[in-house]
Each structure stands twice: as C-alpha cells, then as structure tokens.
Amino acid sequence: MAAIEIPNNIKAIQVQADRTVKLVEIPFGQQDLVKNIPEDQIIVRVRAVGLNPTDWKHGLWEWGTPGAILGCDCAGDVVRVGSAVKHLKVGNRVAGFNYGGSYQSDNGSYAEYVRLYAAVTFKIPDEMSYEEGAALPVVHLTAVQAMYMRLNIPKPFSQPSGDKEIILIWGGSTALAKISNLRVFVTASTSVHDDLKALGAEKCFDYKAPDVVEQIRAAAGERGIIYGLDTVSENGTTELCTDAMSSTREGHLVVIVYPSKESLERRKDVKVELCVVYTLLGFYFKFANTIPFPAIPDDKVRVLEYVKDYMPRVLEGWQSGKGSSTLKPMRLRRLGTGLDKIEQGLKIMRDGEYGREKLSTPKALCFASCMPSSVLQVNRMRGHQ
C-alpha cells in the first residue's frame, strides 16, 4: 500500500468547559509523536467510531477535561506503524481503543486520524464492516481483562479439565465464557433470554425477580458459583451478585464501577475486584480526573498476547451482519452522516433512549458513530466504560 500523507490539521470532537462537545480542527500531522511515532504505537485513518457510556460521561458530564479530544473505540486503516509492532502493518483494517476525553488535547478516536497503542488494536476481517469493528474494542477487551486477567479463568478454546465451573454474568454476554469451557448463568430482561441461550447461556434469570438470588443459588447446586462478572455494578447489583456466590467455596467477583466499602466487606469469602479497561494501556492515569490508577505493565503484555494469538481465532469466519461461530455482531442503528452527529449519539446515550442496538453514522469518509446494545455483549457498562 502506498504511503498516505497525514494532514497537518484534522477535524476532531473536543470537550468544552460548559460540558458540551464541539467539532474543531486540531494540529496533527506535525506533532512529534506523529512524525516520530513511539515504537509500540500505530496511527489509524478512522473510518468508524463507537460510543460507550464513558464517552458521554467525559463529553457531557463532569468526568471530562476541557480541551481534550473525545473518543475511545474506533476502526479504520493503519497508515503508520511503530518499530516494535509485529502483528500489524500499514494497510491493515483494524479496530482499537484510546482513552479519550481525559488527558490528550491532540489525540482521540473521535477524529479523522488517531494514534493508538498497538497492544489494544487488532486486525478485523475483510468481511467485517468498520461499524462492526468499532463496536468491539472496549466491550470485548473489558471482558478479556475481567475473565482472563482478573478471574484467571481458562483462555478461549482451552481443553476442559475436571468439572466445569459456573460464571455468573449480571447483564452481560456469554460468548467468551462459553468458549472458555465455563457454564454460563446470566441475568437479563426476559425479552432477551432466547438470544442469550443461542449465544451459549445455560441458565437465564430475570434480574427483576425479587427472589433472583435464591433462583441462582438453587440452579447452581451444592458446589455453587465461584466466578462472577457484574457488568452493571450499580443500584445494588454488586450486592446481589455477591449473595449469589457459593456458600461453601471462596468466590471472586469482578465489577466495572468502583465498589463501595459495604460491597467490599459484604462477604469475607468473596473477593470483589474493580476492572478498568484503561489499565490495558500500561500507564498511570487519573480516571475522571479523580481516581488514580497505577501503571500495570503486565496488563499491556497480556492484552497484546490476546490480540495477536486469540483474536484472529475469535473472529475467524466472520460474515458481515452474522458474525463468527464464537462472536456475534451488534445491532446497528444508523443516525445520519458526519462527525458532527456524534453529539446527537452522546445525548441519546446520556438520556437512555436506546436499547439492544448500536447507533451508527456513516459519513462520506466512512466515519460512523456507534453505541452499544444492552445485553448481547458485555457492553452496557453504565459506569466507567
């Protein structure tokens, strides 16, 4: 592929001091980090972007930094590659994420070009649309982090050994857990139980049922549940998950919102651990300008291993609109055209005016804004992600 000249100036969505967002033009091509790209990073010409709860909370709420460029998830074409990057090359179609809206005034995914860490960027199949690709990174890699780096369950496609354990996923997906040889229990609205069972859930429970904890414990039997993932992590869900864990064996529950002291101390035999996808980037940061997170270099090493060695197999055989044998695409709802439509998508997400679908906005340059659905992936994360 012929080298693409990166523009000196690009369009991007910027966080404003009055908790709005604005389409602006920013310097890009002459940045030192673009001309002399770090060895572990790449530059992508953005074709589609995805919206997650973290984006509206950084763009339209108090978490964002005025002047920062917004946007985490994106998909596009690689135009420049750092010297240490081995699994990607110029011309690859890729999807990845960036921590937008926080500390960078010159880089973010809601832009025409973005600089990404290669460790959280993966090739997407030719049959996968850019919109489908942009719907994946934060969602999928959060699930990867929670299950393989925190819960330490078997990696995908591993050989079963002994009795299969149960994982309880509160409001989440089944695909990764199923291919990791786990029995999957899921809580969700009854309207989506059939969809979740088609993805591999063994048991589905109505999260609104007053006796949902008792139902889960009864279905789990004497051994009970030792793995849990709470993809909601608010309004009492962490306490319900904790109560549903085994009474005879120690359990481990991963949450995606900072747990309360009461949640942490509810049961001494259940470890409650916070999972924040941005630690996969490998550096220290202050989440929402408030909560410090130390650098976890091992997270970056392990996610790079996953995107290199496991992601190709997870996406193998992908067909647009149908997915692969192990992963299914989001339902997309297209809003119109242009980066300027992202603000509309952020407001829709803020106001809760969406359900089991993604919102997408194709553009003449193939940009899109996408929003996560509520249940078929671990992606309606109402807290930080």
Image: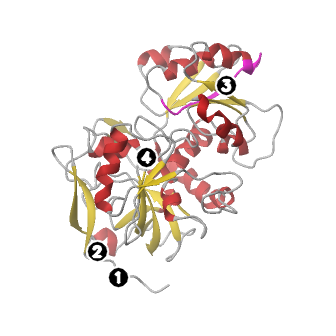
Disc 2 to disc 1: CB gap under 8 Å: yes
Q: Gap in Å between the C-alphas at discs 2 and 1? A: 8 Å
Q: Secondary structure at mark 2?
A: loop
Q: Place residue 124 in its image quadrant.
A: bottom right
Residue shown at 51% from the left, 22% from the top: 238
Residue 88 in the image: above or below residue 252: below
Q: Secondary structure at mark 3?
A: loop
Mark 3 lies on residue: 226
| N-terminal label among 4 and 2 | 2
In the rendered image, residue 287 lying in the magenta stretch gets the answer no
| N-terminal label among 4 and 1 | 1
Disc 4 to disc 2: CB gap under 8 Å: no
Mark 2, Cα crowd under 10 Å, few <14 / some 14-19 / many 20+, is some
Q: Position of residue 127 (x, y in %)?
A: 61, 68
Mark 1 lies on residue: 5
Mark sitting on residue 278: 4
Q: Quadrant of the C terminus?
A: top left
Residue shown at 50% from the left, 43% from the top: 373
Q: In the image, what residue type sits under mark 2?
A: Gly
Does residue 246 appear in this view? no
Color style of the picture: secondary structure
In this view, the mark in front (4 or 1): 1
Q: Position of residue 123 (x, y in %)?
A: 56, 65
